[in-house]
Amino acid sequence: MSYRFTEEERELYESMQIPFVIYGYEDGNIRALLISDGYCSLKKQDRDVLRQKQNMNLLNEVHPKDAKKLLPLALSFAKHLSPFDILYRTKMPDDEKYHVMHAVAKWQTMPDKSEVAFVTFNDMTRGMFEIDRLTDGYELFQKDRFYNDPTTGLPNLNYLLEYADDFAENQRLNGGNPALLYFDVIGMQSYNSQYGFSRGDELLCLIAGVLKDVFPGEFVSRGYDDHFFVISNLQTDEQLSERIDRANRHIKKGAYGNTTGIQAGVCILEKGMRVSDAIGHARHALREVDNDLNITHKIFTNETDEAYWQQRFIIENFENALQNERIKVYYQCIQRLKTGNACALEALARWVDPDRGIISPEEFIPVLEKYHLLHKLDLYMVDQICKEVKPRQDIGLPLIPVSVNFSAQDFDYVDIVGAINDILEKYGVSRDKLIIEITERDVALATNRFREQMQRIRDNGYKIWIDDFGSGYSSLNVFSQYHFDLIKFDQAFLLNLDVNNSANRLIFKAMVDMAKELQILTLAEGMESPDHLDFLREIGCDMAQGFYFYKPESLESIRFKLANGNPMMPCDL
Ligand code: C2E
Ligand code: MG
Ligand code: MG
């Protein structure tokens, strides 16, 4: 006789969530005495149905191959000859598929000394599903992280790269003009260092919210650091400026600390252009904005791209160009107007690249200045000029002084005056053979340190000429503050001599008169015509420099001309 469970025991065992069946002998046959709720839910069937099945043929649903192995093991266990701990395949009624089942059976002696077998089951296949489900869940969580920026809650770069192309295509299909806006926060680094990183994060969150308000329904995401990307239907330049201005007003108002806000580089997403490519273009355009606070954004064009690559070329090849003397000194003759004789030369840099040809200083000087490399060029120029003194003499050129362009920035990095002295000494060139040109802009913006340096230049026996006078910074009081040997009038004067009822003629004359009063020499840049020459003579300007007589030339070119019978320029010493 098998054990008879009390009602209480039955209720307790049946309510258990562990899948198990208690078997016992009844009339010499093994029968299911009790089935737990856990087993019902594992099999997804009613207890009664299960009980019937169990009692009909235990191995009915077992895979035929496994049934063969299982039967002797079960019998052996029933006879207490071996333990029962096996894996087998059994069909599950809900999906009609074989699942791998792990069954462990144990004999248990009950209070009435009868024995029952507790068999616990574990559906390994469903277990795997469960693990997969959990893993999927984890992946979803990961995905969430994968696509979301935890700081601002905006979609991140991964999300942008995955979905922004479709978003843009959709805008295009709806007749829009999608553009990628690459936003950068102006001065984020200093904001962080001034107010701390958590305030910095707050600012980023504020910007995220403002961008969502200003670009409603559009694709707003945070790229990385302080860069935000928006895919927006670009209507007009003005509309975009208005939106960015509005965003900046909100940002300034809502920020904890002082901030200027955001600026954008823009790349229009023409059909076929991928967002991943547009990011690079928009970044170049953003570089063009260059923290100029008057500009809200710049739209990428092929010229922007070219400018960017040219800039990269300059930075990456500059040192090499110096070492290989690819930067050449071009000399432009400066004439005394009374005599027509040359009295000085201005040294102008030309980068002669074997592949790109001659690169003008207008292209590379601003880049070198931006990257704080200009002092290297300027000292190199002094070195080259001194090195060429002997070759100049060798071809019979009288040794007239050479003026070199220096920028105020040069003086920030090295002891320029000391370095110039050393170079001149190295080549045995006297100091009266070198003139230092400094632009009016640099003088007007001079710091105390730079003022001291200008004084040092003069104290060391060099002349200072003020370059590009009248180019926009004209502040006549520079003359009462410093002493200069000469002022070079910007070529814009001669170029625009006859505009505004010839106002420049009057102004020019008045300035020359004033300089004379102050005993400062005058030089006009950009003399291009006989009319210019006549005018300059008439107003009593001392010197001139211009294409009318001489263009800047390399020493080789001058040598070549002399060798080919061109007359030597007359010089004043
Ligand atoms: P800058 O010092 O005012 O030099 C005069 C510029 O005017 C030169 O341009 C010269 O070629 C040009 N020029 C001379 N006569 C005429 C003329 O009749 N008509 C016209 N349209 N232009 C004339 P360049 O050589 O292209 O130099 C441009 C500027 O680059 C220079 O202006 C100077 O500010 C800077 N620069 C050139 N070489 C150096 C250098 O070695 N060091 C530094 N720091 N700056 C340099
Ligand atoms: Mg100059
Ligand atoms: Mg000039």
Image (cartoon, grey):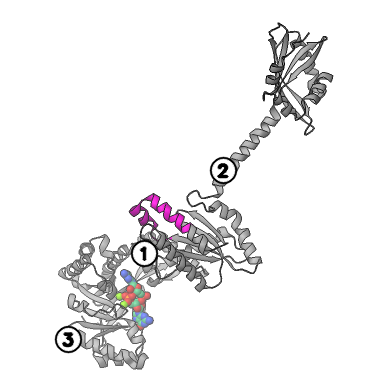
- Give the magenta range: 185-208
* Mark 3 crowd level (few <14, some 14–19, many ≥20, 10 Å Cα): few
As drawn, 57 above or below 42: above
Query: Quick one: SS at disc 2?
Result: helix
Q: For the point 23% across and 67% down, which residue is it?
A: 447
On residue 142, which mark appears?
Answer: 2
Ligand 2 rendered quadrant: bottom left
Residue 414 appears in the figure:
yes
Q: Compare marks 2 and 1 and give the one earlier in the sequence.
A: 2
Rounded to the nearest whole Å, what is the CA distance between mark 1 and mark 3? 38 Å
Please tell me whether mark 1 sits on a helix, a strand or a loop: helix
* 199 inside magenta stretch: yes
Callout 3: helix, strand or loop?
helix
Q: Which residue extends farthest top? A: 113
* Quadrant holding the C terminus: bottom left
* Disc 1 Cβ-to-ligand 1 distance below 8 Å: no
Q: Amino acid at mark 1?
A: Lys
Residue 60: x %, y % from top left: 83, 23
Tell which of 364 and 326 is nearer to you. Answer: 364
Residue pointed to by mark 1: 370
